[in-house]
Image (tube, rainbow, N blue to C red):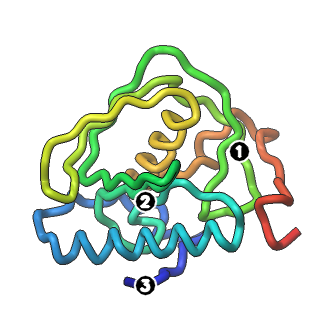
Amino acid sequence: MAIREILLLGNKALYNVSREATRDMDTISQVVNDLHDTILNFRERYGFGRAIAAPQIGEFLRIIYMNFDKKSYTLINPRLEFGEEEIQVWDDCMSFPGLEVKLNRYKKCTISYKDLQWNDCVLEFEGDLSELVQHEYDHLDGILAVQRAIDNKSFRINSKKSKCF
């Protein structure tokens, strides 16, 4: 277990597409433990952070780790399906703390994935959790929220979420 460096906006590796994880549970467990330690450390430093994708710590596997409401979820090799209605949100990211991007996301989504016991699972999300899972899923495909901005005026700094300002 280790706190890993989070790759920051400008790091070209963030645009890499991640490969599917194989059933190598030693590797998966190590990555998940590192994601857990990293997100808790980030939350302590910045006061926010509910989910992180493996590519954000330089592990290009299709793994998302979510930690909120005293629960955690590990989503291995997820597949995402969207509802029809879109919502407009201000999105933030641990790879650019303090910067928020206005973009459109789907109000509802369904995600299918493997859990740590390699069981097939399905979760449905709505509202901010739907946005959250879509954001993390984008990381697996090398897509950053800044690429989904509504226009070139859809950016703002939130000084409460950055120790820099």
Residue lying at the far right of the rendered structure: 165
Q: Residue at x 46, y 24 (%)?
A: 108
- Is the residue marked by circle 2 packed among few (<14), some (14-19), or many (20+) residues within 10 Å? many
Spatial CA span between label 3 and label 1: 30 Å
Task: Return the mark for residue 53.
Answer: 2
Label 1 element class: strand
Hey, what amino acid is under mark 2?
A: Ala
Foreground residue among 101 and 24: 24
Occupied quadrant, residue 9: bottom right
- Mark 3 in CB contact with mark 1 (< 8 angstroms): no
Q: Identify residue for label 1.
A: 101
Q: Earlier in the sequence, mark 3 or mark 2?
A: 3
Image x and y of residue 91, in percent: 65, 44
Does residue 31 appear left or right of residue 44 in this picture?
left
Q: Residues within 10 Å of mark 1 (few under 14, many from 20)?
A: many
Name the residue: 52% across, 48% down. 69
Q: Is residue 127 left or right of residue 103?
A: left
Q: Amino acid at mark 3?
A: Ala
Instruction: Please say if 68 is above or below 159.
Output: above
- For label 3, the crowd category at 10 Å Cα-Cα, with few meaning under 14, some 14 to 19 and many 20 or more, is few
- The numbered dot on residue 122 is none
Please count the marks in the image. Answer: 3
Q: Nearer the viewer, residue 19 or 37?
A: 37
* Quadrant in the picture for the N terminus: bottom left
Of marks 3 and 1, the one in the foreground? 3
- Secondary structure of residue under mark 2: strand
Report the Cα–Cα distance between label 2 and label 1: 18 Å
Q: Nearer the viewer, residue 137 or 30?
A: 30
Up the image or down, 68 lies above or below 37; here it is above
At numbered mark 3, what does the secondary structure look like: helix, strand or loop? loop
Question: Residue 145 placed where, x, y %?
Answer: 59, 47
**The label number, if any, that marks residue 2 in the structure image:** 3
